[in-house]
Image (tube, rainbow, N blue to C red):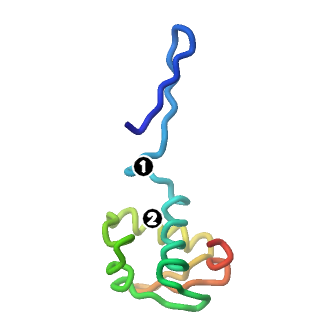
Amino acid sequence: MGEHIEHQGARQVRIARNGPGKQTAETIGRRLLAIIVYGKSCRIGAKLSLDELADSSEVGDWKMPDFRLACRYAASQGWLVVDEDSLTLTTAGLAAA
């Protein structure tokens, strides 16, 4: 289901696609940023607790490794400041959303 096969003469070429279980750090980091900016209506300097994010249906069904990956990527880009139990939106984060 997560791949497409093209026939070219006698050989086949497989083109892999990122399925739901194989999202890149950038993709999932941008999803987290969109949830914070658009879903939670946060602005620069706004802090969200992890409990507030977990209550969100968009984040509540994520697996913990995906959530951690999203936080790490967003922090590495300067979009969010990640504390132990909260996330703070930065100017760069709002601009990237």
Residue drawn 58% across the image and 70% down it: 76
The label shown at residue 22 is 1
As drawn, which residue projects farthest toward the top? 10
Image coordinates of residue 37 in percent, x first then y, are: 55, 79
Q: Nearer the viewer, mark 1 or mark 2?
A: 1
Compared to residue 12, the image places residue 27 above or below, namely: below
Q: How far apart are labels 1 and 2 at the CA level?
A: 12 Å
Residue at image mark 2: 69
Amino acid type, callout 2: Leu
Give the quadrant of the C terminus: bottom right
Q: Residue at x 68, y 76 (%)?
A: 95
Q: Would you call the spot at circle 1 few (<14 residues within 10 Å), some (14-19), or many (20 or more)?
A: few
Q: What label does residue 59 carry, if any?
A: none
Which percent across, then down, holds residue 85? 39, 86
* Mark nearer the N terminus (1 vs 2): 1
Find numbered disc 1 in the image and state the secondary structure of the residue it sits on: loop
Residue 12 spot, x, y in % from top left: 50, 17
Q: Quadrant of the N terminus?
A: top left
- Report whether 26 appears left or right of 48: right
Give percent across and percent down for residue 5: 48, 25
Q: What residue is drawn where x is 50% and y is 66%?
A: 31
Query: Residue 74, located in which quarter of the rendered image?
Result: bottom right
